[in-house]
Amino acid sequence: MDYYNLMAICACIHLLFFIPHVYSNHVETKAGQFFSSGHTNNWAVLVCTSRFWFNYRHVANTLSVYRSVKRLGIPDSHIVLMLADDMACNYRNPKPATVFSHKNMELNVYGDDVEVDYRGYEVTVENFLRVLTGRLPTSTPRSKRLLSDDRSNILIYLTGHGGNGFLKFQDSEEISNMELADAFEQMWQKRRYNELLFIIDTCQGASMYERFYSPNLMALASSQVGEDSLSHQPDLAIGVHLMDKYTFYLLEFLEEVHPASQANMNDLFKVCPQSQCVSTPGHRTDLFQRDPGSVLITDFFGSVRKVEITKETIDLTSPLETPMQRSESGDLQIESLTYVDQLPVAEIIHQKPKQKDWHPPDGFILGLWTLILLVFFQTYGIKHLKHIF
């Protein structure tokens, strides 16, 4: 019996030393994985290049990715959103201020707080390249700038109509794969990114990353050269498709990702296989320095915050300093702060518009005189017209 007790005691002692060692190794592994990418901030440039109602799905594609990156922590201040058309306010939209990505109307990707930085005819090849390279006029506001640096991980997502080596903008101009490759090289030379993830959902999308030659760049496409990228989720009520297949399954994948998720790029490469997409998704990793299996999804779709470690004690329960002002007699007076009375939201929503002064519509007076003359002619004839004038 003493032998078994001794063995049990030895086992307990072993566990006491082994468990902290395993835990410390686990923590060190996670910390090493966290710092291995070398980035301190995240940015996203999301572009829909298509206009017109029948391209509803391209706007929904972009807003789906926009919703996902915001949910995973990238703020609007670090997102440049470019939409070539406003489907939410289109007169054909049966539900204004909404853009749905599912035919059952389950997910409104437009949301309540969408901040569009470039809209309509602002979405051009020139503006897109200027955003990437930072060659913008000095009057351009911060919200329309990509203020990245050499510690930034950037996600660039494009969707629209394309072909072998080009992507159309507004159905009036196009960007070639060589122009895009040169723009990324300028970004690298100007130290505007640490790592860059490029995703494109368009026909023959793989042709857009064939010419890339800049380091630390990873690319994904919804289709190979010679293949079409197909639409998905037709909606008979509005007469258009709601999304493209590749982005639909990409959104489905991202919905399962959370800020602490350990999903990596190899998992992303498996999104929408040919059995689902019909087209063949492709990816390119030869320019990327790290192993895609060690690159977390949140390295590009999430957000990193700088943390300062301090040994000083900070009292968070102390009240804030109250503003004071000095009176004419020299005594200090405490200025009381109050909230401004606001109208309740329910009252704002149901508030009726003010009645305006009535004015006759255009052409009303002229029409009235015409009616009087017609009645007069029919009653008295033209011979009595001299009695009027």
Image (tube, rainbow, N blue to C red):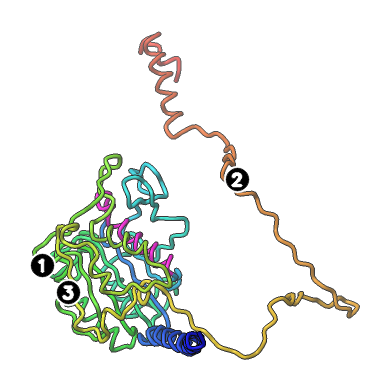
Give the vertical position of 196 relative to 367 (above or below).
below
Left or right of 270, for residue 321: right
Q: Is residue 71 magenta?
A: yes
Amino acid type, label 2: Ala
The residue stretch that appears in magenta: 52-72
Q: CA distance from mark 1 to mark 2?
A: 54 Å
The residue depicted at 38 percent of the width and 75 percent of the height is 43
Which residue lies most toward the left here? 226
What numbered label is drawn on residue 210? none
| Residue 330: image location, x then y, percent | 88, 80
| Residue 332: image location, x then y, percent | 86, 78
What numbered label is drawn on residue 225? 1
For disc 2, the marked residue is 346
Type of secondary structure dominating the magenta stretch: helix
Amino acid type, label 1: Val
Q: CA distance from mark 2 to mark 3?
A: 51 Å
